Image: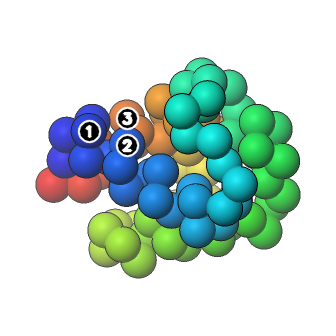
Amino acid sequence: MNATEAEAALTQELRRIAPDVDVAGIDREADLREQFDIDSMDFLNLVTALNKRFGIPIPDADYPRLGSFAAAVAYLGEQVP
């Protein structure tokens, strides 16, 4: 998966979980939970949505690798064929 595809998918899933997300104003390096006021359950819902969408396992140990928009895009690029 290339970065553009990963960004589009992540943006779609973020909008499902936090409909008020202003994707144009995303600080790609900032913590997603803090930036969009996403609580632990919303973050878990995001991880689950990405898991279902791409059919990839995302172990708990990898959750920190999904902390920012840029990190999540990189992670998806590595994990999704």
Residue drawn 54% across the image and 49% down it: 62
Mark 1 to mark 2: distance in Å?
5 Å
The residue at which mark 3 appears reads as 74
Say which amino acid is labelled 1. Thr
Say which amino acid is labelled 3. Ala
The residue at which mark 1 appears reads as 4
Classify residue 18 as left or right of residue 61: right
| Mark 1 burial class by Cα count in 10 Å: few <14, some 14-19, many 20+ | few
The residue at which mark 2 appears reads as 7
Quadrant holding the C terminus: bottom left
Residue drawn 76% across the image and 36% down it: 35
Residue 20's spot in the image, x, y percent?
A: 71, 54
Of circles 3 and 2, which is in front?
Answer: 2
The kind of secondary structure element at disc 3 is: helix
In front: 16, or 62?
16
Q: Are the two marked residues, 1 and 2, in contact with CB atoms closer than 8 angstroms?
A: yes
Residue 4 versus residue 8 in the image, above or below? above
Residue 44's spot in the image, x, y percent?
A: 67, 66
Residue drawn 48% across the image and 41% down it: 72
Q: Are the two marked residues, 1 and 3, in contact with CB atoms closer than 8 angstroms?
A: no
